[in-house]
Structure formats: C-alpha cells, structure tokens
Image (spheres, helix red, strand yellow):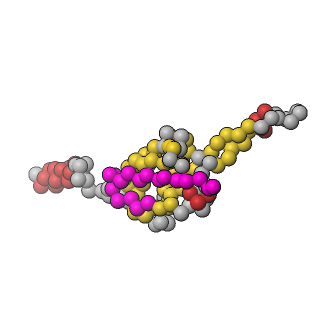
Amino acid sequence: MQGRLVFFVFVAASFSCLAPTGCGPRDPRVTIQGTVSLDGKPVSTGQVIFISTDSKLAAAGSALKDGQFTVVVHKGRHQVKVEAYAEERRTPAPNEPPEATVTYRSIIPPRYNEKSTLTFDVQSAKDRPAFDLTSDK
C-alpha cells in the first residue's frame, strides 16, 4: 500500500510540473513589435537585428515589411542594426551575363547598421520601438 502511495505522489508531482505555473525555467524572451522609417517613410523591406549587450545571449532578428517588424528577444539592453538594400541594374557589356549587371546598394546609413549607434532597452511585450532614421545628406 505504501508503494502505491509513493507512486501516486510521484505521478501527482510530475503532472503538477505541467501546470501553467510550471516547475522548469520560463522563457525569458518577449515578443515585441516595432516600426522603422527612413526620412519619414516606412522601410519597405529589410531586416532588424537586436544584439544583447549581455554577450552570453544570442542576437535576434526579424524581417522588415512595410516598415513593421515583430521579433522575439531577451529583456534588457540591445544594440540595434537595420539593413535594407536597393537593387541597381546597369547595361551589360558585350558578352557579359545579365546577372553580372545587378548590384545591391545599402539604403540605410552605416550609423544604423555596421557602425550602429541605435540602442533599445526591452522591458516587456508592450514595448513598441519606433526607429525614425535619416539619410546622410
């Protein structure tokens, strides 16, 4: 009888770990939504990358569509990088394949990507970062 009681207590304890409060670690990340504009206009396509200042945590990124993004990130301070490119075509030289005439140029100034000065401190899922970028002029 005592063996059954121990088994019942073990099973009950195991199932209690599946309850919403849980026994294991909680996911410390939150999902946030935000916007990116360049010179007052939404950035149509590109990507946003959040790099935690805590070097033990992984970076997180999201695609940009019509100036909006949704990303799952850890709480805390992040460096933010924004990347977006414009396709440029030129007239092909004789005997040059057409694909060689396509290049991509960054439309985002380096101060917002490879030399980013953007930061954001993620506190909760209610955060709505709005990055209003300006071109180099």
Please identify the quadrant where the C terminus is shown: bottom right
Identify which residue, 97 or 115, lies in the foreground.
115
Q: Answer whether residue 59 is visible to the viewer in this image.
A: no
Q: Is residue 122 magenta?
A: yes
On the image, the x and y values in percent for residue 42 come to 50, 43
Quadrant position of residue 116 = bottom right
Q: Which residue reaches farthest right?
A: 94
Which residue is located at x 36 percent, y 57 percent? 28
Horizontal placement of 103 versus 45: left or right? Answer: right
Which residue is located at x 48 percent, y 52 percent? 132
Q: Answer whether residue 38 is visible to the viewer in this image.
A: yes
The number of callouts visible is 0
Horizontal placement of 19 versus 117: left or right? Answer: left
Horizontal placement of 32 versus 90: left or right? Answer: left
Identify which residue, 35 or 38, lies in the foreground.
38
Q: Please tell me whether residue 26 is drawn above or below residue 91 in the rendered image.
A: below
Please state the extent of the stretch shown in magenta in the rendering: 120-137
Q: Please tell me whether residue 77 is drawn above or below residue 99 in the rendered image.
A: below
On the image, the x and y values in percent for residue 51 come to 50, 59
Which residue is located at x 32 percent, y 52 percent? 126
On the image, the x and y values in percent for residue 37 come to 50, 48
Q: Which residue reaches farthest left?
A: 1
Q: Which residue reaches farthest front?
A: 137
On the image, the x and y values in percent for residue 99 come to 76, 35
Which residue is located at x 53 percent, y 63 percent? 117
Identify which residue, 7 or 99, lies in the foreground.
99
Horizontal placement of 86 versus 92: left or right? Answer: left
Q: Is residue 74 magenta?
A: no
Question: Magenta stretch mostly in which secondary structure?
Answer: loop
